[in-house]
Amino acid sequence: MIRLVTTSIAAAAIAAAPYATAGASPRQRVTPHARAVIVPAEKLTARIERPMGVPVFDAPDGRRLGLLPMRTEWGSRRVLPVLRNEGPWLRVIADVPGGGPAWVLASGNDLSLHPRRYTLVAHRSRGTVTVLDRGHVERTVVAAFGRSDSPTPLGRFAVTDRLSGAGFGGAYGCCIVALSGHQTQLPLGWTGGDRLAIHAPSGPSPRPSAGCLVASDADMRYLMRRAPLGTPVTVRP
């Protein structure tokens, strides 16, 4: 659990907080009159505030995997869903080589933490995407997934960008929710890149894709309002 003051905290408060065991939860020191609320680490997002980005590791005090820039390739602020913490270390969902565990250290003012409200859960076999609001089902929409030769990868991903489809020649309909994952089984001759996304159809209705999830324009406009940056997206069989 992490103590938040108002809606976010300076990451320095986490780094400075002592912890007794590996699973201990960091707490921010607050004045007696400050408004504080306890939020489990797995219900937070971590937004990168350091312009140069922050290093990411494969474990607490582990091997450095690289640097997570403050902004994505499309210019959005980088916001990471938090899965859990070990002292000042946060396990996050991030696009790292090999798709393994990603840990960042909350130190200085490198990160700001914010409560997370929405989660998306997709089921390939059902052809659905369910929106959870604080753990409660709000709505389920119908979606097409990857074709049999390029199935949508299973796993946990994060919303990295919310984009208008206007700049992509109509290939992705009205809207695009870009994800942190990649398609490793691209169709022969495919030239559209390997980034996963949830997007609207190029035609009148959703059709199986090269790996992305495809929902109607109306449902995508709804998802754009319910999938802020850092929303976790789980794809299940």
Image (spheres, rainbow, N blue to C red):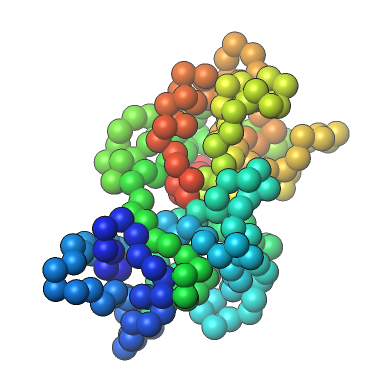
Q: Which of 25 and 149 is in front in this view?
A: 25
Identified at 39% across, 68% down, the residue is 10
Is residue 147 positioned above or below 109 on the image? Answer: above
Q: In the rendering, at what x and y percent does residue 219 appear? A: 46, 23
Q: In the rendering, at what x and y percent does residue 47 appear? A: 48, 58
Quadrant assignment, res 87: bottom left
Quadrant assignment, res 128: top left
**Does the image show residue 77?**
yes
**Residue furthest out toward the right:** 189
Q: In the rendering, at what x and y percent does residue 156 appear? A: 51, 52
Is residue 47 positioned above or below 103 on the image? Answer: above
Left or right, 164 with respect to 128, comes to: right
Q: In the rendering, at what x and y percent does residue 207 appear? A: 62, 21
Left or right, 25 with respect to 36, comes to: right
Identified at 47% across, 50% down, the residue is 230
Left or right, 6 with respect to 14, comes to: left
Identified at 44% across, 39% down, the residue is 227
**Does the image show residue 152?**
no
**Number of residue marks:** 0
Is residue 31 positioned above or below 211 on the image? Answer: below
**Residue furthest out toward the bottom:** 20
Identified at 42% across, 26% down, the residue is 222
**Residue furthest out toward the left:** 33
Q: Which of 13 and 232 is in front in this view?
A: 13
Quadrant assignment, res 119: top left
Q: Which quadrant is the N terminus positioned in?
A: bottom left
Left or right, 221 with respect to 118, comes to: right
Is residue 178 positioned above or below 176 on the image? Answer: below
